[in-house]
Image: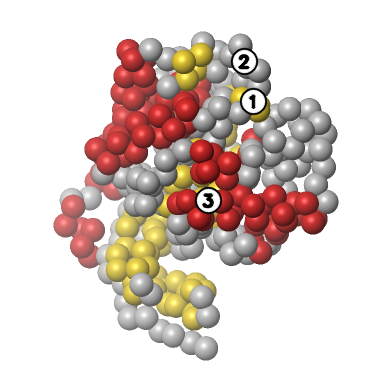
Amino acid sequence: MDVDRDVNLPVEGRIAAGSLDRGSGTAPRFSSSEKGLGILLDLFDEVGIRAVLFVEGRTAQKIDLGSVSRHQIGFHGMDHEDLTGKSTGVEFDDFALEDVLRQGYDSVRDKAGKVECFRAPYMSADDRILSHVSSLGVGYDSSFYAAPGDCAPHMHPSGIKEFPVPEGRDETGKKMAAYLWPMHEGRRGPSDYIWQAGTVDGPYVLATHSWHMVESRSDGPMDPARIGENVSDVRSVIEGLLDSGYRCSVFHRSHGLRCDSRRSHVLARRRFGDVDESVDVVGIGLGEFAYLFEEVIAGEAQAVELVRPSDLVLLPDPVLNHARLGERRDRP
């Protein structure tokens, strides 16, 4: 979820983004973002899920982030800058780019805690931007769209793990991304996103903006009834995905490992800090492939969960207990 200034828009010739003019100019506003964030956090608590929050640095300074600690934190620029300059005509040299990214990172870290992820404003990034983001110690990015068949997480040359947002065609052939804004604007329904998830090869990265829960880009602030409908629609998407066998998760380094179900186990190795960690997964059979991740808490592997479980509905719950982590093998 992007937590940024209300109804943001690039302003030609300016670094900082504005907010859509509602009669008082394009100066940035933050009230809808704060109100929508509270609504979504309550909803996430009710359905029992964690989210990834991409917080804009300036927004972090303007709104209350006291309830975000259980979620994974990312940053989203400092002032919702067009970092590539395509929409504003403002280009960043390496010094300026490093500075604005550091400002955004520090602002979010100071207000919300550890920053693990990045999403570029306007989903507009390139290799140079990600190299600077990586230098901040950020491990995950979600700044690019990908076709449903190409959404498996992958390592970027900068060392960041990329989690693309799906973008393809719906059942009628119309263009569709996994951003919920068309639903907030009344142009799509929850079933569109549940259908799209079933076409994605990889984790389904679902995105929205906090301000869009209470303010329409086309119609302005929503009345209570419209907000209630909005909440109901988002709940229907989440619960529909969970009912279809999906498990909600935040980003992990080992997302995207594949387990061939013709084998009784698979041994995977990944880099964890300065240690090579081997993971032994036993007893998974979910069709041709299953996506999995292992959650590491305080350096110890605690659990295995299935992330892309299109066939999970075929398995009784106890089968999940047969997935275990083998001993950890540390190498210099």
Nearest the camera: 235 or 32?
32
What residue lies at 16% left-to-right and 57% top-to-bottom? 318
Nearest the camera: 230 or 57?
57
Above or below 271: residue 109: above
| Among numbered discs 3 and 2, the one appearing first in the sequence | 2
Q: Amino acid at mark 3?
A: Val
Residue 147 figure quarter: top right
Q: Amino acid at mark 1?
A: Ala
Residue 184 figure quarter: top left
Q: From mark 3 to mark 2, how far is it between C-alphas?
A: 28 Å
Q: Secondary structure at mark 1?
A: loop
Is 146 positioned to the left or the right of 70 in the image?
right
**Dot 1 and dot 2 residues touching (CB under 8 Å):** yes
Nearest the camera: 195 or 58?
58
Q: Give x and y (percent) for residue 291.
A: 41, 55
Q: Secondary structure at mark 2?
A: loop
| Among numbered discs 1 and 3, the one appearing first in the sequence | 1
Nearest the camera: 244 or 188?
188
Circle 2 residue? 24
Q: Nearer the viewer, mark 3 or mark 2?
A: 2
The local crowd at label 1, few if under 14, some if 14 to 19, many if 20 or more residues have their Cα within 10 Å, is few
The local crowd at label 3, few if under 14, some if 14 to 19, many if 20 or more residues have their Cα within 10 Å, is many
What residue lies at 53% left-to-right and 43% top-to-bottom? 61
Circle 1 residue? 27
What residue lies at 62% left-to-right and 62% top-to-bottom? 136
Above or below 177: residue 251: below
Q: From mark 1 to mark 3, how far is it between C-alphas?
A: 21 Å
Q: From mark 1 to mark 2, how far is it between C-alphas?
A: 8 Å
Circle 3 residue? 108
